[in-house]
Image (cartoon, rainbow, N blue to C red):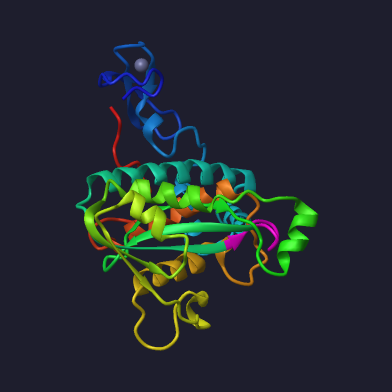
């Protein structure tokens, strides 16, 4: 597809050129509809980044519990360079997740729950609904949205920062809609006993079975996400949450590396989700970030 005019006609090859920096021969493409030309690197995650050699390292470091600033130090670029890469890589990972959902076989058992974190201060909490396939631990969909503060902080939050938008329902519905492509309509959805789930799930998947399980107390290992005492019916989900908290610096417990922008946190989480899926398949494929479908 053409990125300029979105025409459905496939792009034509239009010669090659040598890239100055590494003398690599690259293909140029032309759109038959709007006649615009573009290099094959337009579809790559490296497009217009000067230091191409650090991109995969940056991706892996950010998904391995390294903060953005420290990552910049390690690969010798400024923090803004890392921030730009978070945007590019996150968008690419979201694209890959979408392609993965559309092409994979349909999942029969999916576990859904919300993880909570905050931006800047605990007075501004965030909700993160995530859907994981049971057994394979593949992450299928996720979102980040703001919610109002609870308990003692509610009053302080209201006085200091005003009324906070609750995006819990919107986020959950977005996750359920994305699940539509990769979940068997008659399958099983497992969640905890929260009251927020039954109605949206029944609306999205009227023929699916929704099973609810009582929440258990968290234990210290596993970032408070793994549960104490014996069998955990939503272990796949809790294990994935613990992986998120361990491998994204901003989501760790008791960290001083807090999220500043929820939209960037969402991109980081897309990055981690794609990394996680690649990591689970690492025996067959390398853990490399590439656009999964080249649109030409
Ligand atoms: Zn075009």
Residue 288 in view (yes/no): no
Q: At x 32% / y 60%, what residue is drawn?
A: 138
The picture quadrant for ligand 1 comes to top left
Q: Is 162 displayed left or right of 285 in the figure? A: right
Q: Quadrant of residue 189?
A: bottom left
Picture coordinates of residue 260, whole percent (x, y): 65, 52
Magenta region, residue range: 117-124
Residue 119 shown in magenta? yes
Answer yes or no: is residue 1 visible. yes
Q: Is residue 275 above or below residue 153?
A: above
* 249 sits left or right of 30 in the view: right
Secondary structure mainly formed by the magenta segment? loop
Residue displayed at 74% across by 59% down: 157
33 vs 85: above or below? above
- Identify the residue at horizontal 32%, vertical 18% (top origin): 7
Q: Would you say 81 lies left or right of 151 here?
A: left
* Point 35% across, 29% down: residue: 40
| Residue 255 pos. (x, y %) | 64, 68
């Amino acid at each position: 597809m053409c990125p300029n005019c979105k025409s459905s006609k496939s792009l034509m090859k239009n010669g090659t050129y040598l890239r100055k920096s590494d003398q690599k021969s690259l293909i140029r493409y032309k759109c038959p509809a709007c006649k615009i030309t573009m290099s094959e690197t337009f579809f790559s995650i490296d497009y217009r980044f000067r230091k191409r050699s650090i991109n995969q390292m940056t991706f892996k470091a950010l998904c391995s519990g390294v903060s953005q600033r420290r990552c910049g130090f390690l690969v010798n670029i400024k923090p803004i360079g890392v921030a730009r890469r978070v945007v590019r890589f996150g968008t690419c990972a979201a694209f890959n997740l979408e392609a993965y959902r559309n092409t994979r076989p349909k999942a029969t058992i999916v576990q859904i729950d919300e993880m909570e974190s905050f931006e800047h201060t605990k007075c501004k909490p965030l909700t993160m609904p995530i859907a994981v396939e049971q057994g394979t631990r593949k992450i299928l969909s996720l979102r980040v949205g703001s919610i109002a503060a609870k308990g003692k902080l509610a009053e302080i939050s209201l006085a200091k920062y005003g009324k906070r938008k609750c995006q819990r329902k919107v986020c959950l519905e977005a996750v359920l809609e994305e699940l539509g492509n990769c979940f068997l309509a008659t399958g099983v959805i497992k969640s905890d006993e929260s009251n927020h789930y039954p109605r949206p799930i029944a609306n999205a998947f009227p023929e699916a079975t929704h099973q609810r399980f009582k929440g258990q107390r968290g234990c210290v290992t596993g970032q408070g996400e793994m549960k104490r005492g014996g069998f955990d019916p939503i272990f796949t989900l809790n294990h994935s949450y613990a992986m998120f908290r361990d491998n994204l610096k901003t989501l760790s417990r008791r960290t001083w590396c807090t999220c500043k922008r929820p939209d960037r946190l969402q991109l980081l989480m897309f990055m981690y989700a794609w990394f996680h899926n690649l990591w689970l398949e690492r025996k067959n494929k390398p853990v490399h970030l590439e656009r999964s479908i080249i649109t030409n």
